[in-house]
Amino acid sequence: RKISDPKALIDRLHALGFRVMLWVSPIVSSAGWRFKELRTQKFLCADRAGNPVLRKWWSGTSCVMDLTNPACAAWFHEKLKYAMDTYGVDGFKFDAGDAYFYADDDAIYQPMSAREQTAAFNAFGAAYSFNEFRAAWKFGGQPIVARLHDKYHSWDHFGLNTLIPHTVAQGLAGYAYCCPDMVGGGMISDADKAFDPELFVRWTEANALMAMMQLSAAPWRVLPAEYYGIVRKYIRLHESFGAQIYALAQHAAQTGEPIVRHMSYEFPGEGFET
């Protein structure tokens, strides 16, 4: 409804050298037109009485697909494949899927714990070459991009201060293809104080030599001209290391070693852990 010719848009982005991924989640609105179909086919997490359960998330209260059900997974794959075949979509950002969207006592096709349902979601999305997850469970060493959880637009409150240590820990946990949260913080719109241009710039600098870089806001819209110039400089620095980062990703595929590494991992026994 918002884009009259989505294929033409994606074709143009491809011509400019971009790959195109769509944001998707296993969340189904109970007010949406798909709900009745999925409820009838028993494709939703339910309670012991067989009624679809409602879970709170950032856009309200909705139902969750039961991806332990092979028929439900096949249904979802069919919809995603349609987007790829019809519009040229290259892959998907698989949002949600965190354990708190599920419950250990969910009535589902293959009973399992809430965390294991997260792993089922990971297995579903790993079928796509271009993927990204914000939640994963026991899926280290697998071909998925795991993004750090959304961070606050803050210097020291689950914000920029956590970017490097969390990225390092993520790699050590087996998620080599680390994706930091977006520059400025994924929860930038929820900031309890005014947007901080310097924080955005410093975040860009910290992100420049990590495996991936995503922006939470268009820098030319939110930054003064002189700040935007600095951000452009570090985006281009990131771009200039593309070949090295790609080589490290290939190395990770063979060895499981993280792309971003702690100094004491790279140079053991030299005291860098302190």
Image (spheres, rainbow, N blue to C red):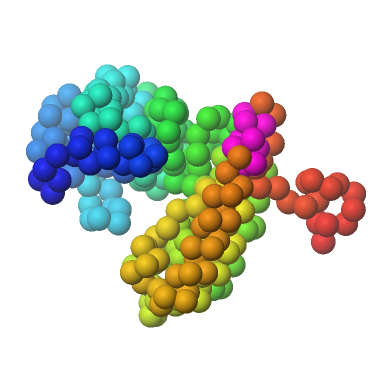
Q: Quadrant of the C terminus?
A: bottom right
Judged from this view, the residue extending furthest toward the bottom is 194
Q: Quadrant of the N terminus?
A: top left
Percent of width and height locating residue 47: 26, 37
Is residue 263 visible to us here?
yes
Percent of width and height locating residue 37: 12, 29
Nearer-the-camera pick, 273 or 244: 244
Percent of width and height locating residue 46: 25, 35
Residue appearing at x 50%, y 39% in the figure:
145
Is residue 44 visible to us here?
no
Where on the picture, by quarter, is residue 30?
top left
**128 in the magenta segment:** no
Nearer-the-camera pick, 229 or 154: 229
Magenta stretch in the rendered image: 244-253
Percent of width and height locating residue 119: 46, 33
Compared with 230, 136 (above or below) is above
Nearer-the-camera pick, 151 or 63: 151
Compared with 197, 131 (above or below) is above
**250 in the magenta segment:** yes
Residue appearing at x 50%, y 76% in the figure:
198
Where on the picture, by quarter, is residue 91?
top left
Left or right for 115, reference 48:
right
